[in-house]
Amino acid sequence: MGRRPKSDRQFEELRAKIILCALSLFQEEGYAAISMRRLAKEVGCAPMTIYAHFDGKIDILQHLWADILGELFDHIRHKLTPDLDDEERLSLASKIFVQFWIDHPDHFRLVFMSAEITRADVGSFLNKSNTLTHFHFYTELVEPVCVNKARVKLVTDTLLNMLIGIAFCANTIKDYPWSTAENMVDVVLESALNKN
């Protein structure tokens, strides 16, 4: 194991530096192209020092995923003011969700398109309580507007898949003259909730 810095503050500062360097390298060159040795060189430490902070490269990537999703859902929660009714809350949350990924294509690629990620890597991330909280948040938005309560999970899952699809196309097929993301989200919501 790498040597622990002398103070908690130094430990946290080095951890933050590792995260920032990893974010930059993963976004510029791709997760698969960066080794722990390369990351350590950019951070200015020995590879074993990084292992004092993270279990490995996938642990760093999962930390970045959590940070990005946390930023997105904090932004959504902040925008959902008490004066909005249930349908307005779901609509606004969905539009912010899609626009976030369109405005941050590097984040989108890092979360949804990183190469050399195994199902186990994704599964272990999805089963973390913080990650599940984000999915439950969307379920809580869908439930009040879904007439058939037996279909809440199905409607939520379908909605999230469709929203990610809009962002995926906007980020990967930029030359096509897509309708506005906002209008597509309206159609997705009408479709997902039409026979709920």
Image: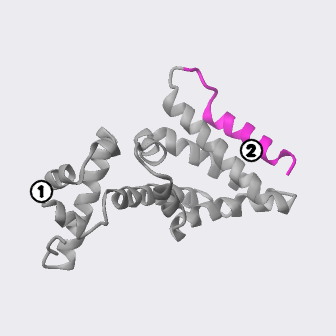
**Dot 1 amino acid type:** Gly
Task: Tell me the tag on residue 189.
Answer: 2
Asked whether residue 190 is drawn in magenta, I would say yes
Asked whether residue 44 is drawn in magenta, I would say no
Residue drawn where x is 46% and y is 43% of the image: 108
The reply to whether callout 1 and callout 2 are in contact (CB within 8 Å) is no
Residue drawn where x is 26% and y is 69% of the image: 53
Q: Is residue 71 visible?
A: no
Q: Is residue 79 left or right of residue 57?
A: right
Q: Quadrant of residue 177?
A: top right
User: Callout 2: few (<14), some (14-19), or many (20+) C-alpha neighbours within 10 Å?
Assistant: many
Image x and y of residue 162, in percent: 66, 42
SS assignment for the magenta stretch, majority: helix
The N terminus lies in quadrant: bottom left
What SS does tag 2 mark? helix
Q: Which residue bears the numbered disc 1?
A: 44
Image x and y of residue 25, in percent: 27, 45
Marker count (numbered): 2
**Dot 2 amino acid type:** Leu
What SS does tag 1 mark? loop
Q: Is residue 149 left or right of residue 47?
A: right
Q: Nearer the viewer, residue 15 or 3?
A: 3
Q: Is residue 74 above or below residue 159?
A: below
Q: Is residue 137 left or right of residue 22?
A: right
Disc 1 or 2, which lies upstream in sequence? 1
User: Callout 1: few (<14), some (14-19), or many (20+) C-alpha neighbours within 10 Å?
Assistant: few
Q: Nearer the viewer, residue 131 or 82?
A: 131
Magenta stretch?
Answer: 176-196
Measured in 3D between alpha carbons, the distance from the residue under mark 1 to the one under mark 2, in whole angstroms, is: 48 Å
Q: Is residue 98 above or below residue 93?
A: above
Residue drawn where x is 41% and y is 42% of the image: 115
